[in-house]
Image (cartoon, rainbow, N blue to C red):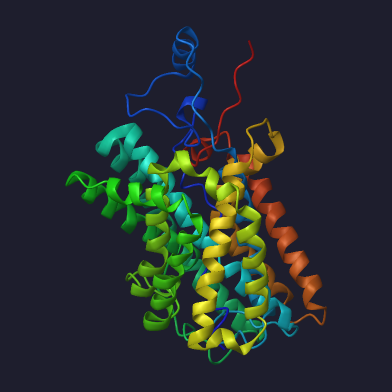
Amino acid sequence: MERPRPNCSGAAVALWQTAPVNPAESPSAEVEPRARRSASADAGERAAFGVPPPPRYDGLDVLRAAAMLLGLAYHATWAYVPDIGPWYVVQDVASQEWFKAAASVLHAFRMQAFFALSGFFAHLVLERRGLQGFVADRARRVLVPLVAGAPLIALVDLGSQRWSASVGSLSADYPFAKGLFLRPLHLWFLELLALFLASAAVAAALGFTGKAAGRGLQRALEVPELLLLGALPTGFSLVRLGEPKPADSYLPNLAAVAHYGLFFALGWCLWLARRDVAALSSRRWLYTLPGLALAGWLYTRDLQYRPEGLWWGALATWLLVLGLLGFAFSLPTAPRPALARAVDASYWVYLVHYPLVLAGHVALSRLPWPALLKFVLVVGVAAALSFGSWALVKDTRVGRFLGSRRAPAPA
């Protein structure tokens, strides 16, 4: 069985944001490449000269929150996939075939959409803060969590193996059951993102920011179906390099770099073509519904494991990513307090949810309960503890570091 491999692709983190302390600092605003200014100063100047406020991308926050929740659900499916033992630390006594299909469909678009959004906002930060500010901001938001989380994740990995083995839920075919391994698990995306951001910084220092590619993307958006040709290099990468497996080692995985790097590049160039994204919005249903139908059909058949199935999977990925971006760009700006709180917590929730899911899987693994009931319990408890713990840290230095937005002071 090749799908789903547990590559820990939790996607729900807020690496796109740039510690927005006030609205002018939000990554969802299109801003000029100038020194940082207060929100009130910018608003006053715009009002004085009759300049409308910069457009915001609230829909991207919606997509981010959805990716976070889907990431938790995705990880929670693994223990209940039939014959998952060689790829995951827990093989539950209960399993259902549809969990494999559900995990594969989620795996087909979540992280790809995340990296597209990461590229979009990375280019925004570069234009706004310049190269030096870009490097400092991205290093703080990407490298620090990766370095700080690495030893903790190693301990979680080792502890979950021993606990699972002690209750009889660790498969003899699990390849990482022989001691302490240093591997990123669900933090793998930070390593890849750091690599992509470093490459972008070097290119910018040499004077290459992708303007020609951005102009090409603008022309392609005149006939958005041309973007579906991105399925060709994606399919080629899957066929020739294999499935991306970045969670198993800190050494860069070539298949993962090629696969996700293409979507980061898409987002990077999409920032330059942002005034033409209405073309994607107009086709959001046209892409998303066929993408879901194709993925649902493909990942319930053995075809998914054959080369021709990989090509079909690449097409489903591009349909879903472009469709979701279309939905994100089409969402109108409006106050959404509940969603704002979820977005605010998303980075923290992603960082802490995976050990909680592991613990739930091991704790329930030998109980003779239905797989669906266990899945719901694992998701519910992990989500409640993740969001609940955020309430305890959001007003601390840790919370502010991870992007907590302070409530405005009363007038």
Above/below status of 127 relative to 284: above
Above/below status of 267 relative to 28: below
Q: Is residue 74 left or right of residue 208?
A: right
Q: Is residue 220 left or right of residue 331?
A: left
Above/below status of 80 relative to 259: below
Residue at the farthest top position: 48
- The residue under the point 50% across, 11% down is 47
Q: Is residue 118 left or right of residue 167?
A: left
**Nearer to us in this view, 386 or 113:** 113
Residue 166 in which image quadrant: bottom right
x%, y% of residue 2? 54, 85
- The residue under the point 64% across, 47% down is 389
**Nearer to us in this view, 181 or 43:** 43
Specify whether residue 370 is in view.
yes
- The residue under the point 25% across, 37% down is 132
x%, y% of residue 370? 82, 78
Specify whether residue 63 is in view.
no
Residue at the farthest left position: 206
Above/below status of 22 relative to 225: above
**Nearer to us in this view, 340 or 311:** 311
Quadrant of the image for the N terminus? bottom right
Quadrant of the image for the C terminus? top right
**Nearer to us in this view, 151 or 88:** 88
